[in-house]
Amino acid sequence: MKLLSRSALSTIGMAGLLATVAILGPQPKPEPLAAAPAPATLNPLERVPGDAGLFAHLNVAAVWDHPATLEIRKAYGKELDTALARLEKETGLRPEQVNTITFHFPKIPSGPGDESLFVLQITTKKPYDRSKILAGLRGKGEDGKGDVVKLRERMVLHLTSETQFTVLHETLLEDFQNGKPTTIAGLMSEALTAAKSGKHTLVAGIDPSQLPNEIFTSAPPELQPFLPLLKSQSIVLQANLDKELAAELRFLSDKEDQAIDAERSFNLLMKLADDGLSTVLKNEKTPEDFKPLIPALTELQKTVQKVKAERKGTEVRAKASISADPALAKPIVAAFLRVGGGSARAQSSNNLKQIGLALHNYHDMNGVFPPAAIVDKKGKALLSWRVAILPYVEQNNLYQQFKLDEPWDSDHNKKLIDKMPKVYALPYSEGKRGETNYRVFVGNGAVFDMIQGIKITQITDGTSNTLLAFEAAESTPWTKPDETEFDPQKPMLKHLRFEDNKASMILMADGSVRAIPNTLPEATLKLLIQRDDGMPIPDFE
């Protein structure tokens, strides 16, 4: 279960904003909600309850205006401008406009759907352009009336004040509008007090007692030595960016023996990190494009070697610092810009995983995967399988708007094309409005048939060996029953989209996502497409 973001020295500001884009990316056309009066301007920290499960507060302005960041911005101005232009288009803001980002989960997610029960607050240095925010987050052509508007199913945008806007789950809206105070006793009170002091660039806290019990009962053997850290009563991180990036991590336990175990676990973790870095740095077969990162990794290892947790009663503290030298950060930024589509590939992988989960949920409810098309009584294809699984990607309201006995381009149904859910949008490029590149192969032993659904038991080659969906080279209207016919006698690789001519993401029938190279043999792809040919799959990664 992923709980915390990662950062890298002076690029932490950019990372925070990119994480925001992942959450706030372009949304389907929303439905307006009843307008609500915005509360009086408050410090966003005043809206985080002391009993929150997870909390983080980042001073973006301090990072963006830091001398190291300024030097990196000058060095990679052109490349960064491209990324920032995309960021501005999707959120209505650029990093230099942002003051702080505050995020919290009232309760740590424990099951499907809970991951959207969060509150994300953005404050700006000066009043933001309301029309740009709405255009970025709500889509073109929206009038933007009201201070509370719907983004996607059950998520809302709250235009809190002229210098603050908030994205949150609609069930949390009432507490937020009431300005729920931090007088509520809770384990986050210490972290909130530290954040309110204004002395820290980043403050984060977690209440481990809210973690799902499965983390402790089902942890693999290699992770069990570190579970005492997650059995702490609370964990607080404070970080400051000046000439150095300095951080302090605190683990507070109920009992002294628990603190002793946490101290041992943390020091063991640092020892393993040191060993891992040594292995990487001593590798004689280091790829050429990885070598520029070696100075930064060397400094990181020196820092790790100095870190030692110290216990005082029931509290364990560990401190670390590393130079904020832009020369160390530049190779990291260069690597990030070089891969370019790294975050986009991660988003596409996540889209495919959500599609895979929806397909499996459909199977659980209906006993089969959906056919490639919703058909009429005569077998004529009307609508795509992507429409059939809408209720399983949190789009039941949109599903109810379709006339399932009419074709995708009927006068009624074609009006819904522009409401394509974000999960069907390929993140690499803007593409044509209402078109998707997530498609499936149909017929001749593929998992999908145009008319009849396939049972998972019919995938006799194994779900981990069989392709379910893929990133297609050509897009199609997402509601159109237009898929790729599988022909074992013809080239199939050309139908896949290879980002930067290197890799393409495919969804396997077990729900996993794999990247395949453009050098994949045609024969191997055809084996992956067929569900019951009985042939082994050669290694291809």
Image (tube, rainbow, N blue to C red):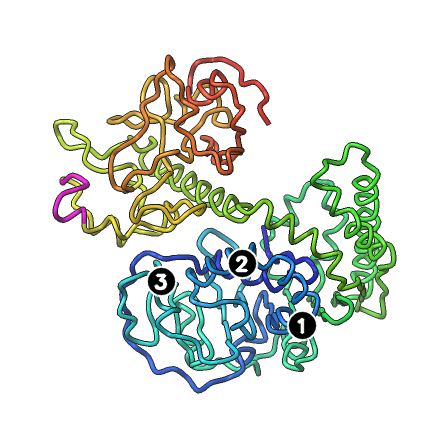
Q: Quadrant of residue 233?
A: bottom right
Query: Alpha-carbon neighbours of circle 1 within 10 Å: few (<14), some, or many (≥20)?
Result: many
Q: Is residue 262 left or right of residue 376?
A: right
Residue at 84%, 43% (x, y): give it: 278
SS class, disc 3 = strand
Q: Which residue is mark 2?
A: 18
Q: In whole angstroms, how far apart are the C-alphas of marks 2 and 1?
A: 18 Å
Query: Alpha-carbon neighbours of circle 3 within 10 Å: few (<14), some, or many (≥20)?
Result: many
Three-letter amino acid code of the residue under disc 3: Leu
Q: How far across and how far down the image is residue 452, in percent?
A: 26, 26
Q: Is residue 442 magenta?
A: no
SS class, disc 2 = helix
Q: Quadrant of residue 150?
A: bottom left
Q: Which residue is mark 1?
A: 201
Q: Of the residues under marks 1 and 3, which one precedes in the sequence?
A: 3
Q: Is residue 409 magenta?
A: yes
Q: Which residue is mark 3?
A: 151
Image quarter in which the C terminus is found: top right
Q: In whole angstroms, how far apart are the C-alphas of marks 2 and 3?
A: 18 Å
Residue at 68%, 41% (x, y): give it: 220
SS class, disc 1 = loop
Q: Of the residues under marks 2 and 1, which one precedes in the sequence?
A: 2
Q: Is residue 103 left or right of residue 459?
A: right
Three-letter amino acid code of the residue under disc 2: Leu
Residue at 13%, 43% (x, y): give it: 410
Q: How far across and how far down the image is residue 382, in percent?
A: 18, 35
| Highlighted range, magenta | 406-414
Three-letter amino acid code of the residue under disc 1: Thr
